[in-house]
Amino acid sequence: MKVDKAGYEKRQRLFGTDGIRGTANVYPMTPEVVVKIGQAIGHLLQKQTLPWISPQRKVVIGKDTRLSGYMIEQALSSGLNSMGVHVQLVGPLPTPGIGFLTRNMRAAAGVVISASHNAFHDNGIKIFGYDGFKIADEMEREIERLVLEEDLNQYLPPSHHVGRTRRIEDSQGRYILYVKNTFPLEETLDGLRIVLDTANGAAYKVAPAIFTELGAEVIQLGDAPNGTNINDKVGALYPAKLAESVIEYRADVGISLDGDADRVIMVDERGEVMNGDHILGICALHMKKKGSLKKNTLVVTQMSNFGLEKRMNEAGIQVVKTGVGDKYVVEEMRKNGFNLGGEQSGHIIFSDHTTTGDGCVAALNVLAVMKQTGVKMSELNKIIVDVPQVLINLRVKKKKNLDAIPGYQSLIDSIVAQLNGDGRVFVRFSGTEPVIRILVEGPDKVLINQHAAQIAEFLEEHLSSES
């Protein structure tokens, strides 16, 4: 076990909150480790009894446009083949496309090689089960154990059982058709001008085809990947250029995807940004009106703006909150039969159509609301009014049960009382670094800054000492 400079105990782990991720050619994203990851996945798949899945195990592998994707794709395929698993390579395709193809092709698993919104020098591995959902924590832990603690060579099958790797040429067309089928058949996008930013990433070919084939005029940004420019000042993390282009081209809407296209940020015709909270709010209200919002419930994370929760409550929609991460949103939706959820960052899950966040599907759902109501995007954007918020990231020397700190809860209760139901306080430790995050929301910007600073000062006193 290692100990970092801040005194945190660090167990050797591969998986984070969304798969395995790191700098390419640096542990754990090295060919040697990736081969072992492929072998561990293959070994577990061979042991599993899976419904309607062929005994001849098959895994679908997709990727985004990072230079290191070629290296990792070959290493992962090699590891899987060595365990007798056959591999289907589909090339650059959005993360949700792999979830879809895994089910569609009756594969035992699907793997996405992507570091999502990170810069090109990073890469990662996300794993889907046969049902198209990301694998459970238990399987992640078992893969870790096999890679870190076992000699996987003992599980290698005889040479005549080695797997084969093939490329699937029509995967993009399958995904395009699948996404288009989530848009109402009685509607088209005729007459709409869309500026589409594909972040030089996985959706640079399929996304423009989706919107063009439905009738829209598409002006594309971030459509020239070269292996090193994915997410480079383009995509969902950088909507400013998209907003400028929407004004310049007098477009009706802007759509911005991230590198693996599982999240989306939109821009209205006035150049105002619409984050995930606004997209969720627009769709939830429309679905409730149509009677298609299951149990009149929306699932969000603790980081969603209080303004979204307030508007939903006014409309009679229950808001259920989970921990930060789209994986936890999906788990809550599956457990309780909800069909809409997501994150402020733009991961939006329509479980009637998808098993994970899908930027193109989410954008089409908002466009469907626009077409069916005849309302401009700027008017829809006004439906959700954000409450001002302040976030302080405080570095600390140790983690401690906050409730055990004398005076902490009374301080929080006092601040919540002052907000008088028009705001909230949310404090949590980061899962990946020695940081505590302090979020305060409320109508008065000056007051919430004071509240956040007060909490930060209190916690710094109690969490920064070595004792």
Image (cartoon, rainbow, N blue to C red):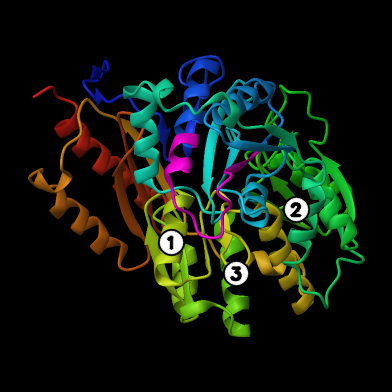
Please state, as top left, top right, bottom left or bottom right, where the N terminus lies in the image: top left
- Residue 195: numbered disc: none
Q: Is residue 14 above or below residue 252?
A: above
Q: In this view, does 195 lie above or below 52?
A: above
Location of residue 25 with respect to 186 vertically, above or below: above
Question: Which residue is under mark 3?
Answer: 352
Quadrant the C terminus occupies: top left
The residue labelled by disc 1 is: 306
Which residue type does callout 3 highlight? Asp
- Crowding at dot 1, Cα within 10 Å, few <14 / some 14-19 / many 20+, comes out as many
Foreground: disc 3 or disc 1: 3
Q: Residue at x 45, y 52 (%)?
A: 49
Residue 23, how many percent across, how many down? Answer: 53, 20
Which residue was labeled with disc 2? 175
**Does residue 274 appear in the picture of this structure?**
no
Residue range (magenta):
42-61
Could you tell me residue 285's position as x and y percent?
Answer: 58, 76
Three-letter amino acid code at the position of disc 2: Tyr
What type is the residue that disc 1 sits on?
Phe
* Residue 170 appears left or right of 1: right
The residue depicted at 49 percent of the width and 72 percent of the height is 311
Identify the residue at image location x=34%, y=59%. Answer: 424
Give the mark nearest the N terminus, 2 or 3. 2
| Residue 371 appears left or right of 81 | right
> Where does residue 82 sit, x and y in percent of width and height?
55, 26
Query: For the residue carrying disc 2, how many other residues have a C-alpha within 10 Å: few (<14), some (14-19), or many (20+)?
Result: many
Cα distance between the residues tagged 2 and 3: 16 Å
Using the image as rendered, state which of residue 406 and residue 187 is in the foreground: 187
Front one among 118 and 135: 135
Q: Nearer the viewer, residue 375 or 370?
A: 370
| Nearer-the-camera pick, 219 or 295 | 295
Dot 2 lies on which element?
Answer: helix
